[in-house]
Image: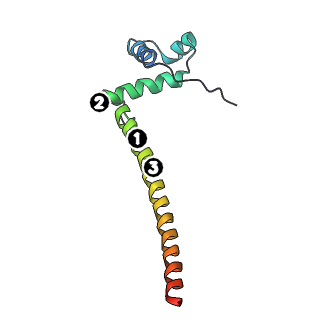
């Protein structure tokens, strides 16, 4: 099973990005700070996207766009759940209404 750890602080990630840009390799920083080289490489790529200069072949969403997408997906799930509840309530009330009107017309 893999270890789950909390995300690294933004300041730490930014420091790693700056060190890579200053010429240090992700593998060197990985050994020194105990972070995977792939994580450092990902942070450098995301920082480049956020700054509007994506690395060649590494197009993607900015951090702000990722946050907005996550927010919109949460909102969509909420609206779909509300719609489903309303559809069930409508069907329930419609069946009750039909049962009531059938009893009234039988009299």
Q: Does residue 60 show up? A: no
Above or below, 78 against 101 in this view is above
Q: Which residue is mark 3?
A: 78
Secondary structure under the numbered disc 2 in the rendered image? loop
Q: Earlier in the sequence, mark 1 or mark 3?
A: 1
Contact (Cβ within 8 Å) of mark 2 with mark 1: no
Q: Residues within 10 Å of mark 2 (few under 14, many from 20)?
A: few
Residue 24: horizontal and vertical position, in percent?
45, 12
Q: Earlier in the sequence, mark 2 or mark 1?
A: 2
The answer for how far apart the CA atoms under marks 1 and 3 are is: 11 Å
Residue 64 horizontal side relative to residue 34, left or right: left
Q: Which residue is mark 2?
A: 52
Foreground mark, 3 or 2, reads 3
Farthest residue to the right: give it: 1
Residue 46: horizontal and vertical position, in percent?
40, 28
Q: Residue at x 49, y 18 (%)?
A: 26
Residue 96: horizontal and vertical position, in percent?
52, 74
Foreground mark, 2 or 1, reads 1
Q: Quadrant of residue 74?
A: top left
Residue 80: horizontal and vertical position, in percent?
45, 55
The answer for how far apart the CA atoms under marks 2 and 1 are is: 22 Å
User: Is 58 in front, or is 72?
Assistant: 72
Q: Does residue 10 show up? A: yes
Farthest residue to the top: give it: 32
Q: Residue at x 70, y 31 (%)?
A: 1
Q: Residue at x 45, y 55 (%)?
A: 82
Foreground mark, 1 or 3, reads 3
């Amino acid at each position: 099973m893999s270890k789950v750890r909390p995300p690294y602080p933004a300041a730490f990630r930014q420091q790693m990005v700056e060190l890579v840009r200053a010429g240090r390799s992700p593998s060197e920083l990985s050994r020194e700070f105990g972070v995977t080289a792939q994580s450092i490489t990902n942070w450098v790529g995301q920082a480049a996207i956020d700054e509007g200069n994506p690395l060649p072949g590494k197009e993607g969403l900015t951090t702000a766009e990722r946050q907005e997408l996550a927010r919109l997906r949460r909102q969509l799930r909420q609206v779909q759940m509300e719609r489903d509840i309303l559809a069930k309530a409508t069907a329930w009330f419609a069946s009750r209404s039909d049962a009531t009107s059938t009893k009234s017309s039988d009299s």
